[in-house]
Image (cartoon, coloured by chain):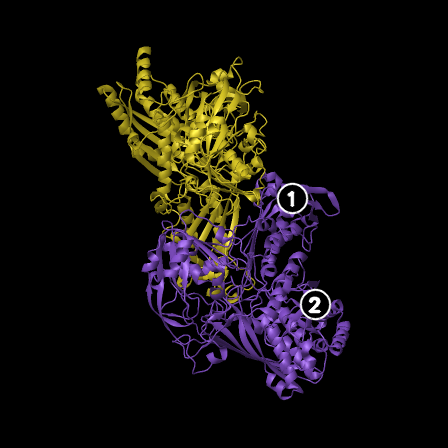
Chain colours: A yellow, B purple
Amino acid sequence: MAGSPTGIGARVRRKEDPRLITGAATYTDDIQLPGMLYAQMVRSPHAHARIVGVHKEDALAVSGVVGVYTFDDLKDAFKAPLPCGWAAYPHLKNPPHWPLATGKVRHVGEVVAVVVAHDRMAARDAAELVRVDYEPLPAVVDLEDALNPASPRVHDELADNVSFTFDFASPGVEEAFRTAEVTVKQRYYQQRLVPNAMEPRAVVADYRPRTGELTLWSSTQIPHLLKIFLSGLLGVPEHQLRVVAPEVGGGFGSKLQVYPEEVAVAALAMRLGRPVKWTMERREEFVSTHHGREGFVDMEFAARRDGTITGIRVNWVADMGAYNLLNGPYVPILGFIVMPGPYRNKNLEVHIKGVFTNKTPTDAYRGAGRPEATFFLERTMDLLAAACGLDPVEIRRRNLIRKEEFPFTTATGLTYDSGDYHLSLDRALEIVGYDRLREEQARRRQQGGKLLGIGISTYIEACGLAPSQATAGSAYGAHLYESAEVRVHHTGKVTVFTGSSSHGQGHETAWAQIVSDRLGIPLEDVEVVHGDTARGPLGLGTYGSRSLVVGGTALYKALDKIRDKARMIAAHKLECHPDDIEFGESKLYVRGAPDRAVAFADIAAAANLGSHAGVPQGMEPGLEATVFFSPENFSFPAGAHVCVAEVDPDTGKVQILRYVAVDDAGVIVNPLLAEGQVHGGIAQGIAQALFEELRYDENGQPLGASLMDYAVPTAADLPDFESHFISVPATSNPMGAKGIGEAGTIASTAAVVNAVVDALSHLGVRDIEMPLTPPRVWRAIQKAKGGR
Amino acid sequence: MAGSPTGIGARVRRKEDPRLITGAATYTDDIQLPGMLYAQMVRSPHAHARIVGVHKEDALAVSGVVGVYTFDDLKDAFKAPLPCGWAAYPHLKNPPHWPLATGKVRHVGEVVAVVVAHDRMAARDAAELVRVDYEPLPAVVDLEDALNPASPRVHDELADNVSFTFDFASPGVEEAFRTAEVTVKQRYYQQRLVPNAMEPRAVVADYRPRTGELTLWSSTQIPHLLKIFLSGLLGVPEHQLRVVAPEVGGGFGSKLQVYPEEVAVAALAMRLGRPVKWTMERREEFVSTHHGREGFVDMEFAARRDGTITGIRVNWVADMGAYNLLNGPYVPILGFIVMPGPYRNKNLEVHIKGVFTNKTPTDAYRGAGRPEATFFLERTMDLLAAACGLDPVEIRRRNLIRKEEFPFTTATGLTYDSGDYHLSLDRALEIVGYDRLREEQARRRQQGGKLLGIGISTYIEACGLAPSQATAGSAYGAHLYESAEVRVHHTGKVTVFTGSSSHGQGHETAWAQIVSDRLGIPLEDVEVVHGDTARGPLGLGTYGSRSLVVGGTALYKALDKIRDKARMIAAHKLECHPDDIEFGESKLYVRGAPDRAVAFADIAAAANLGSHAGVPQGMEPGLEATVFFSPENFSFPAGAHVCVAEVDPDTGKVQILRYVAVDDAGVIVNPLLAEGQVHGGIAQGIAQALFEELRYDENGQPLGASLMDYAVPTAADLPDFESHFISVPATSNPMGAKGIGEAGTIASTAAVVNAVVDALSHLGVRDIEMPLTPPRVWRAIQKAKGGR
C-alpha cells in the first residue's frame, strides 16, 4: 500500500456529511424544473377486488388538474409488465404486473390511477375525488391458507398460489437423519417488515419530445439497472434515456426495485411533454414500497450426541405478496446460499416455496434472505445445545469450520475462501466476559427479579454476488461486475466514476480513501461521481454488500493502471526504472531516495497537457483508466455477535444490556464507516427481534400502517453498540475486503432472540415468536410456567 | 472500411437539424434555473480614459436590483488576470488584463461594472444609471501611429506599444534578393472584421456554496479549456468545476476565448450563491467580442524572369487591440506557418510585430492568420505574373510543388505530407472554362461596358495543430490531442463522448457516420455527447479545422479497440478466427459466409451483461474504449479557387458571376457537411473582400458598430457556390482526413480581390484596399485612368 494518512484503513470523517447535515444536498424532491407538473397516485383500498369503473369527473373539476390516467389511458406507453429478474427460472410462475392495475387490484395500495396537476396540493385533493367502483373479492392473507387448494387465487390464471419452488438436497441428508443420535425440530416465523428509509421514494421525469430524450431522477439504489429496464418498459432507446439517482436517503434494499410509480411518471412526462414529479407520502411507504421478510420455516437438525451436526433440513415458505418483484423470488434463495452457515456440516436439504398473497409484494430488505437463514440456523443451534446438554458456545465451537480448513467448500457448492470463526467467537466472549455473565445469570435465577440472558450468533454472509448456481435464471446473467473510471485532471485532481451508488453508505469517502491510498494524494483532491447513467460506465448498483468488494475493487484495479502510467512518466523524468517509483505526499519519488521526486500534479500535467518531452516517446496522452471487475467468487464476511439481555419476568419487558459484535469484514477501508454500518445493521436486527411488525387483518387490510403505530425503534430503545473487528483478508479481491453493509442485520436478530430465550430457558421457554414485545414474552413465560 | 450505407463518405442529412430547425434545441440563454439572477455589463464609452469614480446609487435604487459590482468589489474573486496562451513566449509583453477594468479603460466596450438584478430588464435599466466619472486620455488608434515613439502608450508600464515580435529568416533570402532578376513589392491592408456569430454570447453560472461546486454554461468553442482556465482564474478546483457548452450558434473563432463576462458572471454566482445569467445584446458583439484580422504587410518577392520565386520577404504589423487575448499573438504566427503556401520556394524571411491600440482586442477569426497570409501571397503572385508578363495560371503552375515532390519540407520546417496542387488547379480551370473566359475578358475590354476579371487563389492550410516550432511558448505545451470515449450499451446502442464540440459544424452527424461505418450499425443507434466537461474525457475543443482530423481520428482509433473486442466475442460465438470477422447490417459475420453471423446487439449484451459462457474465458466485461490521439504532424488541405467577377467601371460595383472551389480535404466523411463548410467559408471570405469593415474614428470610437451599418452580406449578395473536391488522403491519420472548416475563407478573399484587380489590370489598377466597395473600386479606376 502507498503511504497516505487518509488511505485504506484511516478513520477519516465523511466527505459527504457537510452538505448532508447543512441541508445543502439535492434529493429527488429538491429537483425543480420549469413547468413541472405533480403526480398523485390513486391507490386501492381493497386487498382484492375487481375494478368496475373509474369516475374522473370530480377530480378533473379541481382547479389546476391536468388529467387523471388509468391503465387504459397509458397502456400504449407500457411496452412490457414490470420486471422480475428471475423470470427465466424454470420453476417460477410470473403473472404480469403492470404499473397500473388492470381489471383487478391485488393488494391494498396498488395504483389504480394517477392524477397530474400544476401543483402538489391540487393533485392530492383531486386524487381523493377519483371515485373507483370496486367489486370486492375474498383476499388471500395467511400463508398457510394460501397453500390450501380450496383458497381463492391471487392470480386467476394460475392453478394455485405458488409463485415458485426451489429444491436442493445433498446426497447424505437422509442417511444423516436415519442415523441421528439427536434431532431437533422447530417452526419459526419471520414477520413482515417495512423498510422505512428516511427519504420517501420520489421520481421526477423530464421528456423532450423533439429529441426523444428522457431523463428520470429517482430515489433508487440502481440507476443503471433502472435505465436498462425502463428502456424496455417504455420503448425509449437506452442511449436517449438518462437515470439519475441524486442524493438518496436510505434504501436497505427497498430502492432496489423498478417501481410502478417510476414507470408511470416517466410515461406521463412522455405523454404530456412536461416534467412530472411524484414524491411519496410516508403513509404510502407502508403499502407501496416493497416489504421485507415474511415467511415461516420448519427447521430440523440431525446430530451426534456430542453436538456435531450431521444433517440439516429446511422447509421454507416465503410470502411474495401479490406479485413477483425484481428480486422477490431470489430473497429466500440467497438465504439458501448461506444456509450452511459457518459450520462444517455438509448434509443439507432445502425446499423453498414462494407464495402469492393479497398483500404488498416483498423483496430484498437489508440482508435479504441471509438474516432469515441465519436466524433459523442460530436459533436451532441453541435448541441443539439444549438437547445435547451443551453450552451454546460449546455447540458452536464444535461445529465451526476451523481456520486450517479454508478454503472450505459447503454443501451448496460454494467455497469460503478465508476466515477464522473461532477467533471472532473467542474475541466476542472475551470482550463480553462470558463466564462471569453465566455466573451472574445463575445468581439472578436464584435471587429472583430480572433475569439475564446471553445470546450468541455466529454467522457468515455471502457478499458481492459472484457467478454461481444461485444466479441461474437471472435476467442479469452472470456478469455481476462493477465498473470504475478514473480520470486524473491536469492539476492532479481526480474524478472517479463508479457504477455503485450511495444511498447513505459513504461511497464518496471510502472511494476517495482508496484513491488517496493508491495515488498518495489528499482526500479533497478526489471527486467521486455516482448515480448518473450519463456520467461514467454501466454499473450494477448498490446492494448485497457489494459496493466495496466489487465496485471498490474495480476502482483499485483502475488505479493500478493509473499508477503504471504515472510511474512510467515519473521514471522518464527521474531517470530511473518505473518499478522503483513510490507514491506519497502528492509526489512520486524514487524508492529510498525521497528527494528524487516529481509532484503528482506535474505527472498529471505532463500526461494531459505537457510537452512530448515530458512523457516517454510514443506514450498516449491522458491519464485515465476504466475497469470492469467481475468477481470469481463471493466474499464471505463472518463473525460472532453476543447480546446480553435482561428480561423482567413480571412485565415481559426486554432490555439489552450489552451488544458486542466481532466482525471479520476483511480489510477495512474506514473503521468509522464500517462501525456505522454495523451499528445501523444491528439496530435493524434488534428492531425485528423486539419491535417491528406489519400485520394484516383477515381482509388483507394492513394494521398499524403508520409511524404512529409501527414501532421503528428510537435511539432510546437501543443499547450502545460495541463493534470490534478481526481481519482475515478476502482472497477474491486485491484489497482483501469482504463487505460489511448487512452483517449487523444478519447476525443480530438471532443473537437478541437467543438472549431472551436463554434468559427464560430454565423456565422451559423454547421459542417466542417475533417481535418479542412485552406481552408476548410475558405470555411465553406464563405458558411455560403453566406447562410445567 | 466496413460496409454501411451511412458510413464514411455518405451524403446523409444532419442528425441535429430536426431539433435545431424546430426550435427544440437548448442554447445557453434557454437555461432556466430556479432563483436565477440577471447580469448586465456597464461598458466604457471611451477608448482610453482614467476611471475617477463609479456612482452606484441611482442604479441600486431600481426595483429588483441586487447589486452593482466593480473590479474592487470582486477583486478577491479574481485569482489571476485573463489568460494569454502564449504568455511564455519570450518576445511577448503581456500587461495584465482583468475581467473588469481597474484604474483605466483601454477600449470602447471594456467592462467597468456589472449590474445584477432579479430580472433582465431591471438589470438593463439600472446599468444605464450607473454613472462613471472618466478622465479621457488620448487614444492610440492607427497602427502606424501606434509604432511612433511619440505616441501615447496603451499600457503605461510598457516602453512602447509593441506586444511582441517574431522574426524568422532562412539563410538564402538575402542572396535571393541580391541576385533577383525580378522583384515585386506591395503593401496590403487587412481591415478589422467582426465575427458576428448567429447566437450572441451568453453565460449562466450556478454555484453551490456548501459543496463548492461551480457549473458554468457558456456559448463557447472550448468547454474543457475554459474549465481549465476558470479553475485557475477563480480558484475553484477543477474537479468541482463543470463547464457546459450547450447548443452553440456559431463561433468562427470568436468563442475560442476566455471572456471577461465568463469570469465575472461566475464570480458573481459564487459571491451571491444564486445562479446568474448574462446574455449579450447584438450591439455588444461589436465592442466586446474579439475582432478578427487588422494589420498591414509589406510583401516582397524575388524571382527569376521565368517566374520562379526565389525569395519572399514579409513585414507584418498586426493589431492586438488593447490586450493580448488567449491566442491573439498566435494568429499572425499561424499565418507565418502557411506563408510558404503551396510553392516550392524555400527562401523566406518573416518579421511580425504585434501592436497594442485602444481598440477591442483581436484574436482568431475563421482561418486565423492563414487567410491573411494567403491573401498577401496570392495577391503578390498576380503582381509577379504581371511583372514577368505571365498569365496568373502559368506563374502558379511554375511554382506549385509537384505531386512527386511530396513529402515536401518547407522553409518553415514543416513537412507537407501529401497533395496534388496542379490537379486541383487544372480541375478548377477546366470547370470554369478558363481559356474561354480569357477570350471573353478580352472581348469585353474591346466592347466596353462591364469588365470581366478572373481571380485565382491556390492555397494550402495547416490543420490539426500538431506539435511544431509554432507551438513554442504556448501554455498548452505540445499535447494538441483530442479524445474520444466510446461506450457500447447492452442493446448495441452506442454513446460517443468527444472532446471536440460543435458550434454548428455537424459533429453529431459526422461522428455518428464514423461509428456507423466502423461498427456497421445505423446512425440512429449512435448518440454523440460533446460540450460537457462532466461527461467524457478532457478535450481541447473545436478550432483550427481540427475536429475531424484530430477528434475524428481519436474516435476512429477508439472504434478500432471496440472492433477488436467485439471480433473476439463474435469469433468465440461463431467458432472462427477474429481476423475473419466482418461488420455490417448490425451484425458481425464470418468473411465469405454472411449466414454465420451474430447480431451486434448480442455481442453488446454478452460483453455488458451476458453470462461468462458468452465471452471468451477471462475477458473483462464491458465494451468501451477511450483514446487520446495526438497527431505527429499537421494535415495540409489545399486547393484552387477561381472567382469570375464582373466590374461596372461606371459605378465600381462588383458582381461575382461564378465561384469555383476545388478543395483537397483528403477523405470526406460527409460531402453535404463539407460543402456546407466550403459555402460558409467562401461567404465569409467574400464578405471581407467586398463588404465588411469595422472602422474607428481618431478617438477610438467604432463607426457603424451595428448590423444596420456593418455590411454582413446576405444570400442576395453572394453567388452560387460551385464546390468540388479532389481527394489525396492525408498520411497523418488513418481516415486520411485533412480538415475543411476554414479552407473557403482562406482561399476566397484573395480570389475575389484578384478577380476585381484582374478585371481592371488593363487600366493599370494594381491593388485596391479592402473591402472593395463600389466607391473604392470606382476611385481606383479613376486614379488609374488619371495616372496614365
What quarter of the picture does the C terminus of chain A occupy?
Answer: top left
Residue occupying image coordinates x 67% and y 69%: B655
Tag of residue A121 = none
Q: How crowded is the residue under tag 2: few (<14 C-alpha within 10 Å), some, or many (20+)?
A: some
Q: Residue furthest bottom?
A: B178
Q: Which residue is mark 2?
A: B657
Q: Is residue A204 visible?
A: yes
Which element carries disc 2, helix, strand or loop? strand
Residue toward you, A314 or B243? B243
Say what amino acid the circle numbered 1 marks: Phe
Chain letter of the residue carrying label 1: B
Q: Position of residue A330 (x, y in %)?
A: 51, 29
Q: Is residue A575 visible?
A: no
Residue toward you, B695 or B622? B695
Which element carries disc 1, helix, strand or loop? helix
Judged by depth in the image, the label closer to the viewer, 1 or 2, is 2
Q: Position of residue B267 (x, y in %)?
A: 39, 57
Say what amino acid the circle numbered 2 marks: Leu
User: Residue A472 appears in which quarter of the rendering?
Assistant: top right
Q: Position of residue A685 (x, y in %)?
A: 37, 30
Chain letter of the residue carrying label 2: B
Residue toward you, B300 or A416? B300
Q: Position of residue B6 (x, y in %)?
A: 68, 50
Q: Are marks 1 and 2 in contact (CB under 8 Å)?
A: no
Q: Which residue is mark 1?
A: B600
State how far apart marks 1 and 2 are (Cα). 51 Å
User: Residue B179 appears in which quarter of the rendering?
Assistant: bottom right
The count of marks equals 2
Are callouts 1 and 2 both on one chain? yes
Q: How crowded is the residue under tag 1: few (<14 C-alpha within 10 Å), some, or many (20+)?
A: many
